[in-house]
Image (tube, rainbow, N blue to C red):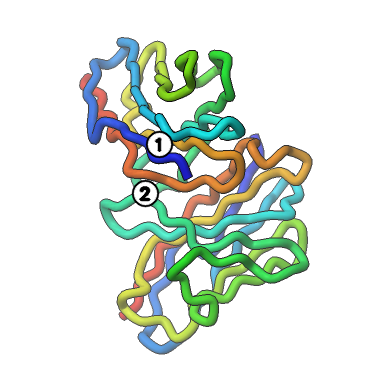
Amino acid sequence: DAKTTQPNSMESNEEEPVHLPCNHSTISGTDYIHWYRQLPSQGPEYVIHGLTSNVNNRMASLAIAEDRKSSTLILHRATLRDAAVYYCIPSDDKIIFGKGTRLHILP
Amino acid sequence: GAVVSQHPSWVICKSGTSVKIECRSLDFQATTMFWYRQFPKQSLMLMATSNEGSKATYEQGVEKDKFLINHASLTLSTLTVTSAHPEDSSFYICSARDWGTVNTGELFFGEGSRLTVL
């Protein structure tokens, strides 16, 4: 499994964009880059995933570096409900969670 | 979106008893389900991969005789914690992938089941 490095925690103001970075320098060629998040006392929730090209969905955008050794999850306009632990997971099958980034949203 | 439901949401049991947790995919079929456990302030740890109609595949360090997994249908997997002890107290979470999607597709997670062993 590819190792990932994410900041332990980040803060952002409500209604501002948030950029969550992730380094995955040992990613293999077949690994997709998955992002999940977990709100307090809940199961994780899928956010987005991609392989090489940048991806957008209703929740977020995923910017993938050209060499695929890093990626950035972008929340375009953070709300209080986006406060969660965000996990970046390179994988081509099983989803193995690292420590993630705890995102705090300030009102 | 697809829904995965777990039951019970929480359970309290006495030491030495066995507890069964159910995981159901409500609106899709899942040939593969995954079981995780999570201790307070820690990340999720993958315990095993549950395969419909065959034996589960356990991650290293997870006792298969302790955590019995049955995946008898395309919509139901069960995890039984046998002879539970206080150290088994944890948040157990299942997930499933729609069998129509590739292995890299989205995983849907249940709400989790909180087990407390007295």
Write the residue at 40% across / 52% down.
B44
Read off the chain for label 2. A
Relative image position of residue B73 (x, y in whole percent): 77, 63
Residue A63 in view:
no
Measured Cα–Cα span from mark 2 to mark 1? 16 Å
Mark 1: amino acid: Tyr
Q: Observer-nearest residue: A56 or A27?
A: A27
* Number of the label disc, if any, that sits on residue A41: 2
Write the residue at 37% across / 34% down.
A86
Quarter of the rendering containing residue B49: bottom right
Write the residue at 63% across / 55% down.
B33
Q: Are marks 2 and 1 in contact (CB under 8 Å)?
A: no
Q: Observer-nearest residue: A91 or A20?
A: A91
Q: Is residue A52 above or below residue B30?
A: above
Relative image position of residue B47 (x, y in whole percent): 49, 62
Read off the chain for label 1. A
* Number of the label disc, if any, that sits on residue B14: none
Q: Observer-nearest residue: A107 or A2?
A: A2
* Number of the label disc, if any, that sits on residue A87: 1
Residue A58 in view:
yes
Quarter of the rendering containing residue B75: bottom right
Q: Is residue B111 above or below residue B54?
A: above
Q: Secondary structure at mark 2?
A: loop
